[in-house]
Amino acid sequence: MSTHFDIDFVSDVSCPWCAVGLGALEQALENLRGEITASIHFQPFELNPDMPPGGEDMTEHLTRKYGSSQGRQTGFREQIRERGRQVGFDFRLEERSRIYNTFDAHRLLHWAGEEGRPDSGDGAPGQQRLLKKALFTAYFTRGESPESHEVLLRAVAEAGLDQARARTILASDVYATEVRAREASYREQDIHSVPAIIIGGRHLIPGAQSTEVFERVLRKLASRL
């Protein structure tokens, strides 16, 4: 009999390492098929909660926030592109010129987690995960704005979710309180960077670990049950 884990994946849709971490986790679960199953629940974390409408130029933002030079940013993009290739994700960071506010994306992800089809026992992704991946692709592969309601609604359709319901949510403040509360909860748990992967509500794996690390940790935790 296989072991099942509930996994909370704390992340932002504008975080490239989160896309890498999700790909590696999915690879690990595929490699552990028959031994371990998991339901992945995406939890909100905004890297830039105060980002104004329209966003900010990417180079200016990274220079101001991290003090990184143009050369370091180029090296970072190459590193991310290679890590993405290893987990089957296509980063086209030259298409991404701005950083945007992601709060509405998190509200839709919360809704998908509440009302969408969950991950199945055989490893098929649920609609919240499909929406998350569609948002990663929109931003990191196509360079689209996760702030744009048009982009968000297209991702909703790609995940097989109800566009009319999503449009209603976006036109209101539905789920705003819930998302803020969850973000505050993770900050209170001293989570200040993402991805942060919490297994079974107890075991934290920080950062975009490799497929091999995820496999090793999941096997170790399963052996203790």
Image: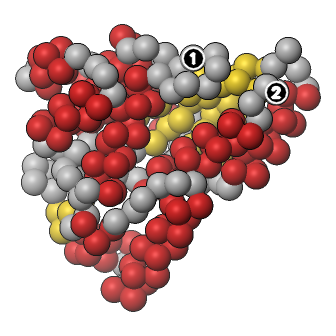
For badge 2, the amino acid type reads Glu
Q: CA distance from mark 2 to mark 1?
A: 15 Å
For badge 1, the amino acid type reads Ser
Tell me the residue that label 1 is attached to.
120
In percent of width and height, residue 129 lies at 45, 30
Q: Residue furthest right?
A: 223
User: For the C terminus, which image quadrant?
Assistant: top right
The secondary structure type at the circle numbered 1 is: loop
For residue 19, side relative to residue 105 (left or right):
right
For residue 46, side relative to residue 98 (left or right):
right
User: Considering depth in this image, is 5 or 45 the residue closer to the camera?
Assistant: 5
Q: Earlier in the sequence, mark 2 or mark 1?
A: 2
| Residue 113 figure quarter | top left
Q: Residue furthest bottom?
A: 71
Point 25% across, 64% down: residue = 96
In percent of width and height, residue 106 lies at 31, 33
User: Considering depth in this image, is 106 or 31 the residue closer to the camera?
Assistant: 31
Point 68% across, 55% down: residue = 210
For residue 138, side relative to residue 153 (left or right):
right
Tell me the residue that label 2 is attached to.
35
